[in-house]
Amino acid sequence: MKKLAVYPFDYQVRELLMHSSLIEKYSIEYYIKKDKFSCTLFSNNTDKITEDYKKAIDAVDSVFFTFKDSSISANRYMQIFSYAKNNEKEIIITGNLFHYLCNYDISIKSYAKLTVYQNTDSNPVNTAVNKSALLNIDVPIIFICGIGEYCNKFNCELDVRNFFTLKNYKILQLGSKEISPLFGFNAIPSFIYNSSTSYYDRVVGFNKYIAAKVKAENPDLIILGVDAPILPYNNNILNGLGEIPLIITTALNIDISIINIYNHNNIAAEYISHLLACGKYRLNSTYTYVNISGTISDIQDDQRSLKYYHVGHALCPLASLNNTLGKNVVYSIDDQKSQTELLNTIYCNLTDSLDIF
């Protein structure tokens, strides 16, 4: 396996450390952290986390530039990129960051050892003969979504993938993050985010896109993850009005949804019931489960932004909440016992229901 260093490393790409054993083709030797990032959450791996980018790059074969961060200047990115390039390292870079840096130095496009992680597959609606019908997808679909940022969606996607991979399922997966290819699958195609294309054409296009993938790959299971939230947070934090998840769930019949939510001491059963109804009627899902993340969200005084805190475990007693609801639908995938229960429940849904499998 090739030795890899990643930059920048912080909480946004924590999965690269937390799920490093699931990464294909590379072994991450160093995580080059951005300035002032606290590593207390990853105290067991401090030997691999460094600020010394030269030491890290000298020790590896490849460097992965993970995401565009507004707190990091283009000059800083280019300083580290140039060091890797001058030392003839393989460079991998996510699409958003690649396009951002090209505005500062167009020559990076010509680097022979450059790979860009971006799903730029075209919208098949552009060449479709029949744009007035949705195709039937006769493969069970698990849809992983959330109510906002930092609520463990990608962690959940990786855990679900690993569970079914170990059961020898052939999986077609599209992920919520641009780092997805490092784990062996592509991200959701960028055409679905293109607001200059009509809602109708994105729905029909995504349906035909998945149908073509199914025909080509013949999977046993489809796992779809989306980063965009499913609902507005309030009247000021609109979260895109939930448009992107709605495009996906209109294009496809969803069998199982996992809605990832923020962590709090007191989560009302009425709130969970609302999310379950959202899963049934908005996400078009046969089964819906709620996953409590390891992140607390705190609304700021202006009611226009959120601040996040990581706690790593569910603060709300799951058993009590499920008892109030009268069914086991709330889990915490950060907790090993709860994760096992959720994944086994989903497996039973898939294997026991003739409507799905």
Image (tube, rainbow, N blue to C red):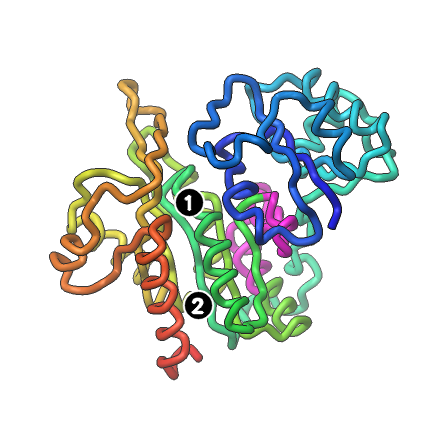
Tell me the quarter of the image containing the C terminus: bottom left
Q: Residue 152 carries which label?
A: 1
Task: Examine the rendered structure and indicate whether residue 237 appears above or below residue 21.
Answer: above
**Amino acid type, callout 1:** Asn
**Amino acid type, callout 2:** Asn
Distance from Cα at disc 1 to Cα at disc 2: 23 Å
Ranked by sequence position, the earlier of labels 1 and 2 is: 1
Q: In this view, does 352 lie to the left or right of 87?
A: left
CB contact under 8 Å: marks 1 and 2: no
For this orientation, the residue located farthest to the left is: 324
Residue labelled with disc 2: 253
Task: Examine the rendered structure and indicate whether residue 154 appears above or below residue 8.
Answer: below
Front-most of 205 and 337?
337
Magenta segment, which residues? Answer: 178-207
Q: Where is residue 196 in the image (x, y as percent from the top left)?
A: 59, 42
Look at the numbered disc 1 and give the secondary structure of its residue.
loop
